[in-house]
Image: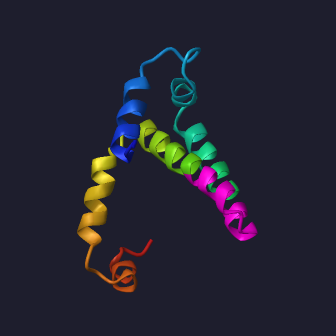
Amino acid sequence: MMTLDDLAATIAARKDADPDGSWTAKLLAKGPEKCAEKFGEEAVEAIIEAVKGDKAALTSEAADVLYHLLVMLASRDVALADVMAELDRRQGTSGIAEKAARPKG
């Protein structure tokens, strides 16, 4: 079974690949803004399927969201390990308390 770490490694490996032979390389070559736009599109599609209640379609769209999130992170050189470390830091803290402690801005 593929893990998010495996997927992140595959995306990183394709960063310098030929955009004509890799969708990931093609997306990354378009820049961080395009990667963010694509992530947003996929997130909206997942929301639509969640509202509709189509479990299979939501599962498929959720996979797209995770993939495009990792591509977006890679486009800005943010490592999945850094995101996971942030989640570890938040573990055991109430979501309400964690949000209240964030800098205002």
Considering the image in quadrants, where does the N terminus appear?
top left
Residue 57 visible? The answer is: yes
Identify the residue at image location x=72%, y=62%: 48
Give how far across and how far down residue 27 sits, in percent: 57, 30
Give how far across and how far down residue 28 sits, in percent: 51, 30
> Going by the image, does 10 lie left or right of 31?
left
Q: Nearer the viewer, residue 101 or 28?
A: 28
Residue found farthest to the right: 52
The number of numbered badges drawn on the structure is 0
> Going by the image, does 65 lie left or right of 76?
right
Q: How is the image coloured?
A: rainbow
Instruction: Find out whether residue 4 is within the magenta segment.
Output: no
Identify the residue at image location x=59%, y=14%: 20
What's the magenta region?
47-62
Determine whether 39 is above or below 50 in the image.
above
Identify the residue at image location x=32%, y=44%: 79
Q: Nearer the viewer, residue 97 or 68?
A: 68
Identify the residue at image location x=28%, y=80%: 93
> Going by the image, does 48 lie left or right of 40?
right
Instruction: Find out whether residue 58 is within the magenta segment.
Output: yes
Q: Quadrant of residue 86?
A: bottom left
Give how far across and how far down residue 95 sits, in percent: 38, 80
> Going by the image, does 33 lie left or right of 13?
right
Principal secondary structure, stretch drawn in magenta: helix
Give how far across and how far down residue 18 sits, in percent: 50, 14
Residue 46 visible? The answer is: no
Considering the image in quadrants, where does the C terminus appear?
bottom left
Q: Nearer the viewer, residue 57 or 7?
A: 57
Q: Quadrant of residue 59?
A: bottom right
